Amino acid sequence: MTAQYQVHGDVAVITLNNPPVNGLGLATRIGITDGLASAAADPAVKAIIITGAGKAFSGGADIKEFGSPKSLQEPNLLSVILALEASTKPVVAAVHSVAMGGGLELALGCHYRIAAPGCNVALPEVKLGLIPGAGGTQRLPRVLGVEVALNMIVSGEPQKSELLASLPGQKLFDRMAASVESLAEEALAFARSVADTRPLPLVRNMPCKHPQGDAYFQFARNMVGGMSKNFPAPLKCVEAVEAATKQKFDVGMVTERDLFINLMWTPECKALRHLFLAERATSKIPDVPADTPQRTIASVAVIGAGTMGGGISMSFLNAGIPVRILEMKQEALDRGIATIRKNYESQVKRGKLTQDKYDKRMALLSTTLDYTDLKDADLVIEAVFEDMGVKEKVFRQLDATMKPGAILASNTSTLDVDRIASFTSRPQDVIGTHFFSPANVMRLLEVVRGAKTGKDVLATVMALGKKIRKTCVVSGVCDGFIGNRMIEQYSRQAGFLLDEGCTPAQVDKAIEKFGFAMGPFRMGDLAGNDIGWAIRKRRAVERADMKYSKTADLLCELGRYGQKTNAGWYDYVPGKRDAIPSELVVKMIEDHRKSLGITPRKISDEEIVQRLVFSLVNEAAYILEEGIASKASDIDMVYITGYGFPMFRGGPMCYADQVGLFNVVQAMNRFATNPLDDGAFWKPAPLITRLVAEGKTFN
Ligand code: NAI
């Protein structure tokens, strides 16, 4: 039973009970209308309460029914709300903890609302590329005023019940309970107090006006439009709320419905809904059940206080987990700690962190030069130089010192985690934790599962990653794991495009217009072009058959490593990050082209984007087929959270599905005929060919 019905004297209580957040799935909706019918038929019942069991009133739509016909099956949410409004006995919503989306819309359909403090109240549909679709845009402005309601609808952000209840003139909550614990009792008393009051108040009958309507909505459109380019939903939120102020209630409801349905079919909405589910799916590992036992991680050690070691340490400190950092020399430790301090201090200065929290975090941090001080840590993460010899020494040392059962993790970005595990006598305890830079900021954490990594170790690290607020994606062992293995193909294409006639700025602009946060050349300058150079040198030995453009090497030979040298693909003014096109680099590319005897051609933005994005897709198809990633949606999450792929396109795999894999293959076949490109690479991966033949998609 996902909704229970009980009668307490003269009050009927309908309790939503569909864990974890009382999603309004079909069975729950039927439970509500059945409860209303029972209450109507029972002469002893004078009033009705709707509340939620467990940790929520209701979080809204049931994600298990997302986009399925069940979500629309009668009684759909609109019909349930109509039934609430039609009840001849007063209905009181007793909300607590979470009242979001459809859950809040349900409460707005009730005659009265009583709330516990601390309840998160939101209409978050905009985050899925939608607007609220069950009257939220028409009812919320009537109880909170147009401006407050529009801010909530456009941002999708939750507000606390006590804050909303304190707004002058608000009609969202008729009463605040003293606490979550007393809510049930207070709701009963309140329901009895209004049992005989008539007429029954309905939100739909309340007025909805803004004193400077036209000017305000023009202002809102300008603001929202400027902030939400590429996302159609926020402007539609404005349109729907404006309709609430200008149309009769029932006409406004039709406007809301039309806008909602039109958004539902946009590629942006499909992409955002895909990502919502993809994020939740990352923690599902086919052969590691959810109830896999986990190890306790109460303390963490980090080896290396450099760029990554510092950021990784901060991620744990932020979550209240004590960290001890080990370095070889005191100076390196001092430098690392100073950087952490500086980072936190700038957060304090900008008002992002309180002094108290800063002090608490620093108190959790300790340092050492001696491995024996680490032996009791539950997890150790190595972040030393990217060199197998150095890693070997560190892991042999860890094997000799760490207590049994400690998890030994490496932050390597390219090296073989299985080899690293082989340096220890406990490969089942070894795992890769590939953080992205800056590690305290970037959401992505690739969790690299070695051939012998224990399932409990994997489950533990995945759960811990969530605790430090990362999006964890499991990757098998291969050169570059999921993200960097794909980016290599993307970078190769970027290089070929220069050889064939593009400038760095042209390539960057095209892909940034597509929606990437940063094009490949601005990205290279930010990360340091020398890093890729070092990797290419290593690969030149390991994979001598791989074809590369030489331009990136020529650039590095000039010492143009990027922002850190104030010169890379672009020029930089010291202290500033603006990328200024460099005549010298353009000349270098032209000279190189000449030396190869290439006549430059004009390359369209469309070709640039397709070659860059489809190179990701083709490599990803191999990654899927080899089982390095267990599902296409994991690859999308890697690219969205770690590589600045545009969210509104849903990730490379989602995008390829939307373009149509048949069309993707056509483009690849075309690129394969270009003698200056790598024809062999463009042979579509067998998985893609198979999916096209079967008329299927990645996701
Ligand atoms: P870094 O050069 O900034 O820091 C490395 C630190 O390790 C230095 O402070 C050094 O003194 C220390 N160290 C070296 N050998 C040591 C040893 N035997 N014992 C103790 N400390 C030792 O390097 P970064 O960038 O922090 O990289 C560290 C690891 O993280 C590498 O494996 C790298 O591939 C990986 N990584 C780097 C990313 C980046 O963007 N920088 C991104 C993801 C992974």
Image (cartoon, rainbow, N blue to C red):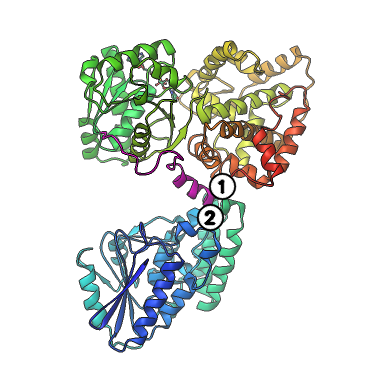
In the visual, does 476 lie left or right of 91? right
Residue 149 location, quadrant: bottom left
Magenta-colored span: 272-297
Image location (x, y in percent) of residue 504: 64, 26
Image location (x, y in percent) of residue 103: 40, 65
Q: Residue at x 61, y 58 (%)?
A: 265
Relative to 129, does residue 585 appear above or below in the rendering? above
- Compare marks 2 and 1 and give the one earlier in the sequence: 2
Image location (x, y in percent) of residue 189: 21, 77
Q: Residues within 10 Å of mark 1 (few under 14, many from 20)?
A: many
Evaluate whether residue 208 shows in this view: no
Q: Residue at x 40, y 72 (%)?
A: 31
In the visual, does 423 lie left or right of 527? left
Whether residue 583 is in magenta: the answer is no
Whether residue 274 is in magenta: the answer is yes
Labels 2 & 1 near each other (Cβ < 8 A): yes
**Foreground: 248 or 16?**
16
- Tell me which amino acid carries mark 2: Gly
Please name the predominant secondary structure of the magenta segment in the image: loop
* Residue labelled with disc 1: 648
